[in-house]
């Protein structure tokens, strides 16, 4: 076992020996991060550079990235995305159907514009040609309830 006392690794400074773990076959050292936190760190992680800090580096990076929102964010694509189900979503923060990131499915916004009002919670928009990304007005049909929309699909399968 190598004496690591006083050595510096990234943001860690080794301040005391902690213990030896038979299962991991490694020594653990008590280390102080530059931010002041003290933790037990695996000696192999220190030497390999896989443990750089107590986690404060990741927190600093997250804080920096979090400040860049909207058009300033690196992954900004004009406020238009495609979700995992194939629907196109538009940035519309404050909309009653917006998700936690402020996006609303485009077909809902198109139908609301056509109607000149917001959709009721019960109303459901259907894509006539089955293409969830085709949000042209003539490809959309409004159903009063999701149950009527489901019944319509059931009838289509029976034909």
Image (spheres, rainbow, N blue to C red):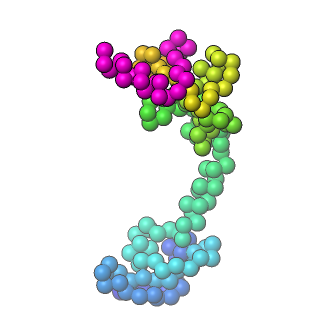
* Corner quadrant of residue 103: top right
Q: Position of residue 125 (x, y in %)?
A: 52, 23
User: Looking at the picture, does residue 64 appear above or below residue 44?
Assistant: above
Q: Position of residue 12 (x, y in %)?
A: 54, 75
The structure residue drawn at horizontal position 60% and vertical position 43%, both measured from the top left corner, is 100
Please state the horizontal and vertical placement of residue 154, each as a whole percent of the image: 36, 23
In this rendered view, identify the residue nearer to me: 116 or 35.
116
Judging depth in this view, the residue of 35 and 23 nearest the camera is: 23
Tell me the residue at 58%/66% (across/down). Answer: 56
Total marks placed? 0
Secondary structure predominantly adopted by residues drawn in magenta = helix
**Residue 79 visible from this viewpoint:** no
Q: Is residue 92 left or right of residue 125?
A: right
Q: Is residue 10 magenta?
A: no
Q: Which residues are magenta?
A: 136-159
- Taking the spot 50% from the left edge, 83% from the top edge, the residue there is 30
Q: Quadrant of the N terminus?
A: bottom left
């Amino acid at each position: 076992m190598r004496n690591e006392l006083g050595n510096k690794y990234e943001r860690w400074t080794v301040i005391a020996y902690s213990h030896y773990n038979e299962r991991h076959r490694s020594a653990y050292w008590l280390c102080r991060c530059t931010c002041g936190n003290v933790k037990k760190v695996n000696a192999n992680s220190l030497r390999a550079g896989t443990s750089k800090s107590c986690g404060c580096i990741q927190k600093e990076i997250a804080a920096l990235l979090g400040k860049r929102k909207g058009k300033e964010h690196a992954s900004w694509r004009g406020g238009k995305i495609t979700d995992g189900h194939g629907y196109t979503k538009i940035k519309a923060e404050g909309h009653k159907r917006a998700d936690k990131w402020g996006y609303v499915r485009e077909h809902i916004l198109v139908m609301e514009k056509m109607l000149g009002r917001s959709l009721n919670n019960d109303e459901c928009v259907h894509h006539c040609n089955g293409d969830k990304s085709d949000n042209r007005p003539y490809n959309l049909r409004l159903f009063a309830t999701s149950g009527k929309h489901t019944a319509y699909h059931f009838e289509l399968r029976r034909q």
